[in-house]
Image (cartoon, rainbow, N blue to C red):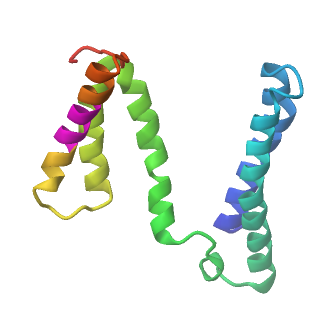
C-alpha cells in the first residue's frame, strides 16, 4: 500500500468519524451543523483524490511520487499544523505577546528565511504593533500568561 492510499484512507476514516459521530453528537440541529458538515465535505475532496491516485498508482505499479498531488513545499507548509497547535496551547500559559514573538521567529526559521535583520525585527515588531493597536487603542484584552 502506497503513501497516498494510506493518507487517503486515514483521513477518509476521520471524515466519516466526524460526519457520523462527532458532529451529530456535539451539534444539535441542522442549521448549526451546516458549517461543520460543509468543512468535512471540503476535507473529503482532496482525500478522495489521494485515495484515487493511490489506487491508480497501485494498479499501474508506478510509485506514488509520480502522481504527486501536493508538492513538497505544500507538504512542508502542512508541518506548520503541529507548531500551531503548540502555539495555541502555550498562549494562555506564557502570554500572547511573548509566545507570538517566539513563534514568529520559529516560523521564519522553519521556512528558511534568509538570515538578515528582518529575522530579528519581525518577531519583536509584530507583537509590539498588535499590543499598541489592539491592546492600547482598542482596549481588547489578549491572553496574559506567566511572562506578559
Query: Is 35 rendered above or below residue 120?
Result: above
- Please identify the quadrant where the C terminus is shown: top left
Q: Is residue 93 above or below residue 105?
A: above
Residue located at (12% from left, 60% from top): 116
Q: Main secondary structure of the magenta part?
A: helix
**How far across and down, in percent of the image, does residue 144 sit?**
31, 15
58 on left or right of 124:
right
Q: How many numbered tags mark residues here?
A: 0
The residue range painted magenta reads 123-130
Residue 95 appearing in the image? no
Query: 40 and 32: which one is in front?
Result: 32
User: Which of 110 and 137 lies nearest the eye of the viewer?
Assistant: 137
Residue 40 percent coordinates (x, y): 76, 44
Percent of width and height locating residue 66:
62, 83
Q: Nearer the viewer, residue 125 or 20?
A: 125
> Looking at the image, can residue 106 be seen?
yes
Residue in the image at 50% along x and 64% along y: 74
On the picture, is 3 further left or further right than 120?
right
- 140 left or right of 15 in image: left
The residue at the point 75 percent across, 36 percent down is: 36
Nearer to me, 3 or 127:
127
Quadrant of the rendered structure where residue 65 is?
A: bottom right
Q: Is residue 124 magenta?
A: yes
Q: Quadrant of residue 30?
A: top right
Write down the quadrant of residue 27 in the picture: top right
Position above or below: 95 against 85: above
Amino acid at each position: 500500500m502506497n503513501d497516498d492510499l494510506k493518507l487517503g484512507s486515514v483521513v477518509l476514516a476521520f471524515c466519516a468519524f466526524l460526519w457520523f459521530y462527532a458532529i451529530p453528537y456535539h451539534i444539535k440541529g441542522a442549521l448549526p451543523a451546516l458549517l461543520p458538515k460543509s468543512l468535512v465535505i471540503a476535507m473529503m475532496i482532496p482525500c478522495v483524490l489521494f485515495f484515487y491516485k493511490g489506487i491508480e498508482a497501485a494498479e499501474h505499479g508506478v510509485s506514488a511520487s509520480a502522481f504527486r498531488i501536493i508538492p513538497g513545499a505544500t507538504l512542508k507548509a502542512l508541518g506548520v499544523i503541529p507548531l500551531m497547535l503548540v502555539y495555541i496551547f502555550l498562549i494562555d500559559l506564557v502570554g500572547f505577546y511573548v509566545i507570538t514573538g517566539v513563534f514568529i521567529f520559529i516560523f521564519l526559521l522553519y521556512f528558511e528565511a534568509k538570515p538578515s535583520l528582518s529575522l530579528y525585527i519581525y518577531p519583536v515588531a509584530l507583537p509590539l504593533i498588535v499590543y499598541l493597536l489592539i491592546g492600547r487603542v482598542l482596549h481588547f484584552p489578549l491572553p496574559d500568561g506567566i511572562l506578559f
